[in-house]
Each structure stands twice: as C-alpha cells, then as structure tokens.
Image (spheres, rainbow, N blue to C red):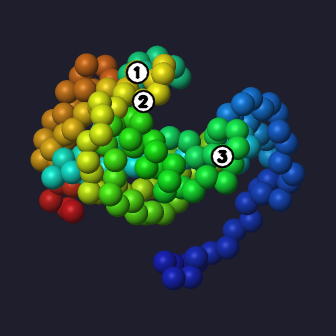
Amino acid sequence: MGDRCHPVTRVVPDADLPEEVVWEGCFITAKKRGRWEYVGRARDIRAAVILAMIDGDVLLVEQYRVPLGRNCLELPAGLIGDDAGAEGEDDLAAAGRELEEETGYRAGRLEDLGTYWSSPGMVSESFTLVRATELTQTGPGGGVEGENITVHRVPLADLAGFVAAKRAEGCGVDVRVLMLLATDILGEQA
C-alpha cells in the first residue's frame, strides 16, 4: 500500500496501445486509444487562460457558447498558435493579445502560473494559466468580429453573489471560475 510520499505504481490498461485519430477538424481532433475515446486540439494548438486583476477586481467575460446552448461566464482565454504562421507563438504574448482583444485591457505584467488540464478524463487539451496585473484600459474589449463578448469587472468581495446571479439568469459558469470562489466554497475550512 502506498502513501503520499510512496505511491503505488499501477498498470493503466490501454496506456501503451497506439493512439488512433478517428476524426480531425480545423481545431479539434477526436482520438481513441484502446477503450478510451477523447478529444484534443488539432495542430498542437494550446490555450491560455488569463487571471486579470485590477484594484481588487477580477475581469470576467461572458459569451455565447454553442456546445452549451447558452452564455457562459469565464476567465478571459484564447488559443495560442491557432493562426497560420503563428505555430511557435509565445504563451505570454498570446495571453496578452487575447486579454486586450477580449477585455480591452493591456497588461503591464504577465506571469506564467503553470500548465493545467481542465477535464483530463475526456480532453487532452491543456492550458497555461497566466496572471495579468498592472492593467491599463485601451478600449471596450468585446473580442474580434463575431465573438460578441461582454466584459465584467467584478470586485472579488462580490464575486460569489455575482456568479450566483449569473447562474440564476441561466448563464453557464466555466470550471476555472471555481478557483476564485474557493474560499467561499470551503468556508471556514480554508
């Protein structure tokens, strides 16, 4: 039996089987490895998720998401290296670009907080979490043509109520918003 410092090594069924591409589009690839079916980004496209803070407020975006059939409240985010010729795009440069496109704020400082996976049992996509500070508003935001993004600047102290109100409106809430609600969810345990 293992413990925190000495985990038990287990054989994972299907881990050594070859990966099969079942279908590939411009942005998504459906794959199969043994009994496992999952999706990932095509062409080694990655994503950046931006935690943008200004004067005790956090910037959130809201936009319609076709897979959900409704608006979704999210941290600003975007793809890295998705445009032709941008395959080697730097994660922080892409995060800065996406932040300004979506929110209308430019970051004076961007910090890489690591790589994370949002739903590893079904999706192989990872994202780089980037903290953006020293923000200056340069425009209204809203994204590029066709994105129709609404920007929300929310005081952290009011975030739980804001999220509850958006949920009551029928808005979906991206799982990454949970990290901002952690102390509210954990209560006195935190």
Amino acid on which the number 2 mark rests in the picture: Gly
SS type, badge 3: loop
The tag earlier along the polypeptide, 3 or 2, is 3
Q: Are marks 1 and 2 in contact (CB under 8 Å)?
A: yes
Cα separation, mark 1 vs mark 2, equals 6 Å
Q: Which residue is mark 2?
A: 143
From the image, state whether disc 1 or disc 3 is nearer to you.
Answer: 3
Cα separation, mark 1 vs mark 3, equals 24 Å
Amino acid on which the number 1 mark rests in the picture: Asn
Residue 8, position as x, y percentages in the image:
62, 75
Q: Which mark is residue 86?
A: 3
Residue drawn at x 33%, y 37% is 104
SS type, badge 2: loop
Which is more toward the observer, 48 or 70? 48
Q: Which residue is mark 1?
A: 148
| Left or right of 157 on screen, residue 20 | right
